[in-house]
Amino acid sequence: MANEKFESTVAVLQGVSAKLEGSILTISGKNGSVQKKFYALGLNLEVGSSDIKITACSLMQLNTAIAHVKNMLLGATEGFSKKMTTIYSHFPIALEVKGRTLVIKNFIGEKKPRLANIIGQTKIQLAGKEIIVSGPDKENVMQTVANIRCATHIRARDSRIFQDGLYPVEA
């Protein structure tokens, strides 16, 4: 059992290229490119012409690596997006994208704007009260959503009364 190896292959989709340099796997497609470092002990990746072969010491490592590679393939072809909405009761929230930062102005009447970092290749589209966060890397998209959510967290007030903020509504 100690020397047991588990292996599996993941098919590379049409129009997608995969490249492995050391432990960094890069997958490029029509929606962009996604990089991830696979540095776990006992995990080995081999990139072929039409598939990626993954070998691991444990089944948990293997299934985790397979899920990461599938998410990378999906992100490079279709991408990931998350829709958020702005909720306020009295002070209208103004949003603006400046470089790699989302500026949240007039949040609960504050004079100083709140800032949320945009991670990686993630893009933000503003349409009225709706915000669409999209990009090829699932982890970067969700971290950007979390940054926006944390930037609008209200401290030292009753959360049942002060419900203003930017909330995710659908995937």
Image (cartoon, rainbow, N blue to C red):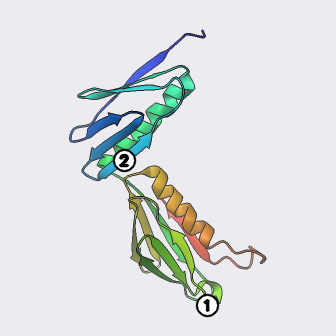
Percent coordinates x, y for residue 90 in the rendering: 62, 89
Q: What residue would you read off at disc 2?
A: 34
Q: Is residue 38 above or below residue 30?
A: above
Give left or right: position of 45 versus 95: left
For mark 1, what is the residue?
111
Residue visible at 30% across and 52% down in the picture: 32
| Badge 2 density bin: few <14, some 14–19, many ≥20, Cα 10 Å | many
Q: Amino acid at mark 2?
A: Val
Residue 112, position as x, y percentages in the image: 60, 86
Mark closest to the chain's N terminus, 2 or 1: 2
Residue 131 vs residue 49, the one in the foreground: 49
Q: Residue at x 32, y 47 (%)?
A: 76
The amino acid type, in three-letter code, at marker 1 is Lys
Within 10 angstroms of label 1, few (less than 14), some, or many (20 or more) residues?
few
- Could you say whether the residue bearing mark 1 is in a helix, strand or loop? loop
The residue at 51%/56% (across/down) is 142
Give the SS element for disc 2.
strand
